[in-house]
Amino acid sequence: MLVNFGWNRHLRDGGPGVQWWSSNAPGFTEDLCRELHDLGVRAVGSDDPTCDMGWVDAEPTAAFGHLEYFLPKDIYILENLENLGGLPPVVYFAALPLRSTTARAPRCVPWPSCPSPSRPPGGPRPTGPRPRRRRATPH
C-alpha cells in the first residue's frame, strides 16, 4: 500500500525546509497498522521520512508499524518515496532490490505500473489471442 501524505510540499522553495520536514511527520494509527497487517499487505510506503512513524519536533509519537505490526512480521516499509501524487489511484507496485557495492544498507527501486484500462483490477482477463512479442535483435 502506498500513501501520499503530500509531505514533499514542505521541501519546495518557500517551505519550512529539510530540518523541519525530517523532524515532523504524519504517521499511521495503531488501528491502521493492525488492519494492514490483517489484510496481508506485504509492503507499505509513503512520501514522508518514516512512513508509519509519527514525529513532532524530532520526538516520535507513534511507531506501531516499525515496532509491532510491520518489521517484526516481515512487512517491508518504504520511506521517502517521491512523486506519489502523480500516480493514478490504483497501480501495481513492485520494490526491486539493488545490489550495493558499499557497506550501506541495501536499497530498492520502487516500480509502480498502471493497470490496463481494458482490465480493471480484479476484473476478467481479456479473451482472444495474445499479441506476439518481438524478439530483440542483436546489434
Image: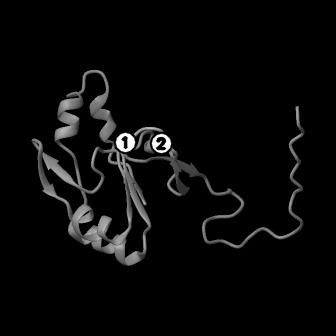
In front: 73, or 116?
73
Disc sitting over residue 34 in the figure: none
Q: Which amino acid does label 1 sit on?
A: Arg
The x and y percentages for residue 102 are: 42, 38
In front: 100, or 80? 100
Q: Quadrant of the C terminus?
A: top right
Q: Left or right: 73 with respect to 110?
A: left
Task: Name the residue tied to disc 1.
Answer: 104
Mark 2 crowdedness (10 Å alpha carbons): few <14, some 14-19, many ≥20:
few
Residue 14 shows up from this direction = yes
Q: Label 1: how many residues lie within 10 Å, few (<14), some (14-19) or many (20+)?
A: few
Residue closer to the observer: 127 or 22: 22
Q: Residue at x 36, y 78 (%)?
A: 38
Which residue is identified by label 2? 100
Q: Is residue 5 found left or right of 62 in the rendered image?
A: right
Instruction: Give x and y (percent) for residue 136.
Output: 86, 42
* Tags 1 and 2 touching, CB below 8 Å: yes
- Report which quarter residue 61 is drawn in: bottom left
In the image, taking residue 68 as reference, residue 1 lies left or right, namely right
